[in-house]
Amino acid sequence: MITMIPLNHTQIEEIRIQKRDLEVEVAKALNGFFQQHYKYSIQRLVHRLILHILSVEELKLTAWLIPKRREYLTFQRDVKPTWVGLNEFLNREPFWTLENCSDMIRLFGETNERWKDFGLHDTHLKGQQSLRPEPTFLKVGSSKPIKEGGWGGDFGHRDRKDVPKEQIVRRGAPYEDIGTRIVRGVDKYKFEPKSVIGAIDRTFGLRPEGADISGTTTDSIYALRWAGGVAGVSPDVLRAIQLLPLVTMVPQGHHTIVECSCPLSRQGYIDYHIGYYTTLVPKGAADTVGSRFNSVLAPFDEPARNKHILVWGSGAGEQGVQMEGKEIEAFKKMARVLSAYGFCVAGGLHDFGEALNVVKTFTPSLVPALEQLRGQVGLSELERKFRQFGLPRAT
């Protein structure tokens, strides 16, 4: 029995907006969960990171920080951009927000990138860069692997450009209010054609907006690993709080769930399946931890509010199908972010034939339903009824 619902461009766009709002709500719920269960542990780790930053000579660090007050870096909200200002901030540890902590992790990463200027050892920079390898992907239906050249290669992780300042439109809801001095990633950047994340967004019915794959998340993974070892945080807690970039940046509109979850999945902290939010539960989490995460995330996986769709084509000509009933669970295998990255690396699904081939590869049980919808997908509801009942169209 066919339960898949064929979709046209207008219907797909409506679902994209619903999904965008839902995913921000997911991240906000996780943020509240982290406030309750992990804030103290995160503060302990960030304390270690700030001590490392303050190992830089005072004049050098202040000379670098002051110009950044004029940039969009979020840590400027609550910190005077000087060596002394960081020391003052360090003494306010009990009052740090999760967002403060996330911003300091970002500053730690940027400090390491300037290790030569600051007279630091390059150990931390090498550690950060090791989390951004040149992965190999296998194109669906081909035995020949595709290698991409790091972050900016032919099939690079990231392909984005800055939106000209005069064209930036500052979005409000559903994102948190972050003031007027800071520009959200979803407002500041625009995907370019070779962005794999952009192709994933289009293919799975997400809004193609964001800052592309999150380098901040990979830097955060390294920083928390290092600080966790120094501070003696338990491995179970450390694995859980690796989701910090997601729970702080997504509500603010700096990145999307898929942009943060891709590096987290690559590094084995989660095994995210796009749109299946209980897969954000950390891998290997103790039963009590997993149960807590599930209690927060499970309501967002209810079919009444969470629609799973597959899209092909582009622009006004794009088409798609919405999964229903048992198809939702079958579609989950195809929605694994690391698998999706592989078949979206060449730009997503360009036509019905490509969509059918990918479905055959990952979820063959969905093939009969998809094939029976051939010719109906992309039609308006009125056009579909004309064809269903064999009625002539008015001219």
Image (cartoon, rainbow, N blue to C red):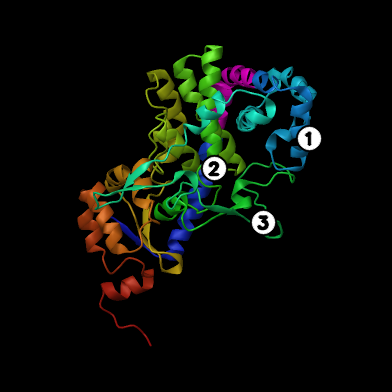
Q: Secondary structure of the magenta portion, mostly?
A: helix
Q: Quadrant of residue 351?
A: bottom left
Q: Is residue 352 shown above or below 359? A: below
Q: Position of residue 318 (x, y in %)?
A: 40, 65
Q: Quadrant of residue 283?
A: top left
Q: Nearer the viewer, mark 1 or mark 3?
A: 1
Numbered tag placed on residue 24 in the rendering: 2
> Is residue 284 or residue 37 the one in the foreground?
284
Looking at the figure, which quarter contains the C terminus? bottom left
Residue shown at 65% from the left, 49% from the top: 172
Which circle, 2 or 3, is nearer the viewer? Answer: 3
Q: Which quadrant is the N terminus positioned in? A: bottom left
Q: Residues within 10 Å of mark 2 (few under 14, many from 20)?
A: many
Disc 1 is placed on an element classified as helix
Q: Which residue is mark 3?
A: 169
Q: Nearer the viewer, mark 2 or mark 1?
A: 1
Q: Foreground: 118 or 328?
A: 118
Query: Would you call the spot at circle 1 few (<14 residues within 10 Å), some (14-19), or many (20 or more)?
Result: some
Q: Which residue position holds label 1?
A: 66
Q: Residue at x 62, y 48 (%)?
A: 173
Residue 389 visible somewhere in the drawing: yes
Q: Residue 187 location, x and y as percent?
A: 63, 52
Q: What's the residue type where badge 1 is placed?
A: Ile
| Magenta stretch: includes residue 200 | no
Q: CA distance from mark 2 to mark 1?
A: 32 Å
Residue plotted at (77% across, 39% down) = 67
- Which percent across, then down, holds residue 383? 35, 74
Pointer 3 local density, CA inside 10 Å: few below 14, some 14–19, many at least 20: few
Magenta region: which residues?
29-49
* Residue kind at label 2, given as amino acid type: Val
